[in-house]
Image: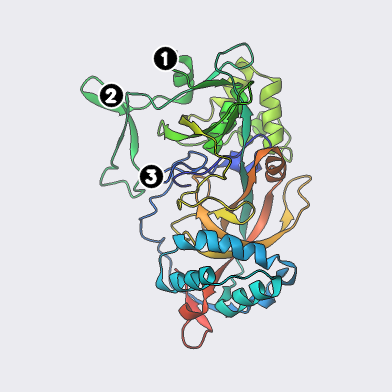
Amino acid sequence: MHPHIAARFAAVALALTFLSACASVPASHPVAPISGKPVPNPAAPPHAEPPAAHTLAPLSSLPGWAEEDHLSALQAFQIGCGAAKPPAWKAVCRRAKEQTITDEATARAFFEDNFKADVRPATGLLTAYFAPEYPAQTTPDEIFSAPVRPKPDDLVMIDPGPGDPSGRKQARRVAGDDLVPYPERADIEAAPVDKALAFMRPEDLFFLQIQGSGQLVFPDGHRVKAIYAADNGRPFLGIAKPMTEEGLLAPNRTSGDAIRGWLADHRGSEAQTVMDKNTRYVFFDLIPDDGSDPAGAAGVALPPGRSIAVDPSYHAYGELYWIDAAASVLTGGAKVYRRLAVALDTGSAIRGDMRADLYMGRGDQAGAEAGHVRHTLLLIRLIPVSAAGATDETIPQG
């Protein structure tokens, strides 16, 4: 997923984000998303695919288009489109920002006049995430026993070797004159902490690390943002699958709420054994909470409900997509998601052309909704008409 981006929590979105995950960190970081997961190098060339011609369709033909809140979508596009680099996208972004549009009809006309839809039959998966808020303390007790650790002094990031096509930096530990792989979660948590930034409930810290950032609320009402600082370079492993395989959760009961609830009910060695299956560990910085939504990998604050994390080897930041996700694969996930959204983030679990993670916003209400999003997805890229060619009929993939 991306440099910067808020978090995802408690009812955290993803049955699947647990099977995978998405996150981000401050824009200055080249490789980490809101959830603090490793991400592809945004500068890497697009994923190589055989060229294919796609028929472009008018936006009015999209299912649910007439019911869309086009004015809200336009406002989100104006916020995020500056991240787009291709000339055609820069031109349509400039037109969007130069206009003052305050009514629904004009906003709809703007999209229909400037874009066509690149519709393909392939389907994938939509999940969701959010910026969680967690209680925290400055001192530990039996409940708030998990330290929020800063980036260790002995952790260094090195460039990938010539045989590594990922472009990701690698986490290493200084051991004398050598650099060795950084320890796994279980080893880190077994070691004493010298300078904890705060103390959290273990299951909350686990979710915070999956999300990559979040807000911490202290007993006196003081609030800060916990943002991604570094990770131990270990691969992320979602715990939903092993929990179902071991009979700890039913296969259709793997929402974020269900997982977190089980961890809280079994707090201690039993829950710790399950969490240790995910060897990845994330370190944090604390900064003042200004009340804003987090920034995603594109370096832009994420408009709630209108921004998605994507695989940057297939999709470019700042571009516009139509989400068509009507069928949920989770119990209780009956809501239909058909809307425009801007690609502004990424995550290590977000892989492939038809894969997106929808940012829902901050707090428990956003988290409750995000936790029930796991839908079959048709992800439709919008193409500026100036990029569609003279005939406006076909456009090559890639």
Task: Please tell me whether mark 3 sits on a helix, a strand or a loop.
Answer: loop
Query: Which callout, 2 or 3, points at the residue further toward the start of the chain?
Result: 3
Q: Quadrant of the C terminus?
A: bottom left
Residue at image location 23% in from the left, 25% down from the top: 178
Q: Can you give x and y, in whole percent of width and height, for residue 208 in the image?
A: 56, 32
Q: Amino acid at mark 1?
A: Asp
In this rendering, the count of numbered labels is 3
The reply to whether discs 1 and 3 touch (Cβ–Cβ < 8 Å) is: no
Q: Amino acid at mark 2?
A: Val
Tell me, for residue 28, which label it has, or none. Answer: 3
The vertical placement of 193 against 211, above or below, is: above
Q: Quadrant of residue 370?
A: top right
**Marks 2/1: CA distance?**
17 Å
Q: Is residue 234 visible?
A: no
Residue at image location 52% in from the left, 68% down from the top: 97
Can you identify the residue that label 1 sits on?
194
Q: Classify residue 325 as left or right of residue 41.
A: right
Task: Please tell me whether mark 2 sits on a helix, a strand or a loop.
Answer: strand
Crowding near pointer 1: few (<14 within 10 Å), some, many (20+)?
few
Query: Which callout, 2 or 1, points at the residue further toward the start of the chain?
Result: 2
**Marks 2/3: CA distance?**
24 Å
